[in-house]
Amino acid sequence: MQTATRPALTAKSYPVDDFAAAQEFFHSNGWTDGLPVVPPTEDAIAACLDWAMMPPDQLIGIEPVRAQPITAEKLAINAVMAGCLPMHFPIVAAAWQGMLKDEFLLHGISSSTGGCAVLVVINGPIRLEIGAASTFNALGNSDRATSVIGRAIRLSLINLMDVRPGGIDRSTLGHPGKFSYCLAEDEEDMTWEPLSVFRGVPNDGTSAVTVMAALAPRQIMNEWTTDPKEILETFAAEMRANQRHYSIYGGNYAIIIPKQLREHIQNAGWSKRDIAEFLYERARIKRKEWADVGKAAIVRDRPEKVHPALESPDHLLVIAAGGPAGGFGAVIPPWMGSKTKAVTVPLGVCVDCEPG
Amino acid sequence: MTLHVFDPTHEGKTAGFALAPRLDTLRGKTVGIITNGKEGTKGFFTHLDRMLRDDLGAAEVVWRQKKNYSAPAEQEIIAETRQWHAAVTGIGD
């Protein structure tokens, strides 16, 4: 219920008979991802806003291409629908701050036939506060927090940017990450600096969110060596495969390194910077390799031109996550080269400031 | 028990881009084509160009290509559109 101190919500409200009626109402209006939603009631929405200390009309940002304002109230409605608890909402808001930066190219990535999703990576103490898990099934349904935060991103894209399949969303295939694509880094079980620190956030316990326009994960396996170079050669080969089979152009790649492989690399004294520099050198192909995979038509007159998967080592997102056993890893390619850039946003630094 | 649920959409509160006034005819007009440069657009726009000139009587068809096919057209292209009577954009893959 609205209190004397709580600003009124301005969104239109509708009476529905019960929970089941609410489901049919939301589905029939095209306001869902096809799964049931939590009915966004005033109390639930207000609780999210209260937790984040945001008035309903606070401007999270303006989408630069369509000049679409995104307000805290509308974002909170979608977060509630996704199943978010109030403590999850600041992460959803910070992710949107990042997504609204020009370099993220939100309109392009969400309307493209390429069919990417927004990958959200959480760093810092807030992971523990919200119960985000970083180990078993890290890229799947690992825990409540990452599941609902990732889903909130998709529902808000659908409802606030009209990113519906066949509408603004022109994806040919899409991928399962378009339901939810969020993970937290396993900071308690690594010697490396967190992804957020690698990307410039102060190493002082500041929590942060990184967003990246990302394709589906490509899983690798190498259980037969402890040599960091050999392990990373497998990651490099997968990145090269993506260059051949999908897009040759360099951009942000994320790699997920679970504990088993991570320990071999860490024990050898390799840092995230070392990994990035190694993969920058090894993950690259010549344009003529396109001819090997049926794309000879676009090799044109530049067969010897070398295309690195990363424009620089800084463009690699090395993420420690995954269950404790198994010599697996994953490469998450960018949507399309460097047309979009990953963005990292610190949490709780200044709610009115431009994202970092 | 009745629930009061809130609208999750932008409720039409958008920047309010408006369509340009419709032309009665393209005869004698200058029509711009802003292409994203994708491979599949070449044949499509070439055919459209011919239709605009031969079937609809356009005086001139101007082609401009965006540098980034996923981003808005550059400001110089937007500025040039003011010299056109109509523009074809936003399609092609």
Image (tube, grey):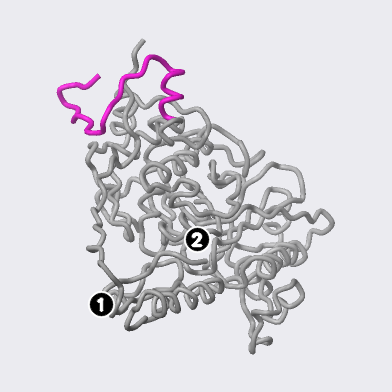
Asked if one can make out residue B28 in the rendered structure from this viewpoint, the answer is yes
| Residue nearest the observer in this picture, B19 or A197 | B19
The residue sitting at 47% across, 34% down in the picture is: A130
The residue furthest right is A224
Q: Are marks 2 and 1 in contact (CB under 8 Å)?
A: no
**x and y percentages locating residue A122 in the rendered image:** 49, 46
Say what amino acid the circle numbered 2 marks: Phe
Q: Position of residue B45 (x, y in %)?
A: 47, 74
Number of numbered discs on residues: 2
| Quadrant where the image shows the N terminus of chain A | top left
Q: Nearer the viewer, mark 2 or mark 1?
A: 1
The numbered disc on residue B79 is: 1
Q: Is residue A310 left or right of residue A330?
A: left
The question of residue A145 being in magenta is answered with no
Residue under the image location 43 percent in, 43 percent down: A158
In this view of the protein, which residue sits in the foreground, A115 or A354?
A: A115
Q: Chain of mark 1?
A: B
Give the magenta-colored segment's residue range. Answer: A1-26
Tell me whether marks 2 and 1 sit on the same chain: no
Q: Residue furthest top?
A: B1
Task: Single out the residue that lies furthest toward the left.
Answer: A4
In this rendering, would A332 be left or right of A236? left
Residue A232 found in image quarter: bottom right
Q: Can residue A191 be seen at all in this image of the molecule?
A: no
Vertical placement of A248 versus A128: above or below? below
Q: Please name the residue that numbered disc 2 is placed on.
A: A198
* Badge 1 amino acid: Ala
Q: Residues within 10 Å of mark 2 (few under 14, many from 20)?
A: some
Q: Is residue A25 magenta?
A: yes
